[in-house]
Image (cartoon, grey):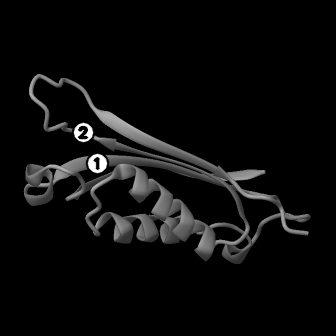
Amino acid sequence: MIKIALHQLKFHAYHGLYKEERTAGNDFEINLTVSFDEPSSRITKLEDTINYAQLYELVKDRMAIPEPLLETLVMDIARQIKEKFARVREIDISIRKMKIPLINFLGEASVSFHKQYDVIT
């Protein structure tokens, strides 16, 4: 299995249930790992792997669309990755919301999603 990972992607976006999140926005950090079966020979061409630049663009585009729940967001990103890259066998994604709009809440919140896909033979 080969893994491609994008770590600590930073976005300012407007996800959340609270009015201030939808108007002022929030800072988010995403960690993403996708896995796929290794080919029978060496990988020597971009077409034989998962292009991490395309992964980043997909995540960036989806982060630009406001969503009330981070759970919906991580599942949507995973679905879009699988649709674009059929060879993906496993996806791990987490989104951290850096500022929580709750009184006396000191910390961050995150949502993680893991999905394994069956091998099609």
**Three-letter residue code for mark 2:** Met
Q: Which residue is mark 1?
A: 28
The spot of residue 35 in percent (x, y) is: 69, 54
**Rendered residue at 51%/66% (across/down):** 55
Give the mark nearer the N terminus: 2 vs 1.
1
**On the image, which quarter does residue 12 sit in?**
bottom left
Given residues 16 and 33, the one toward you in this image is 16
**Rendered residue at 53%/70% (across/down):** 80
**Three-letter residue code for mark 1:** Phe
Q: Which residue is mark 2?
A: 98
* Element marked by disc 2: loop
Q: Decide: is 15 above or below 57.
A: above
| Number of numbered discs on residues | 2
**On the image, which quarter does residue 102 sit in?**
top left
* Horizontal arrangement in the rendering, residue 94 relative to residue 109 (left or right): right
* Horizontal arrangement in the rendering, residue 54 relative to residue 67 (left or right): right
Q: Decide: is 105 above or below 59.
A: above
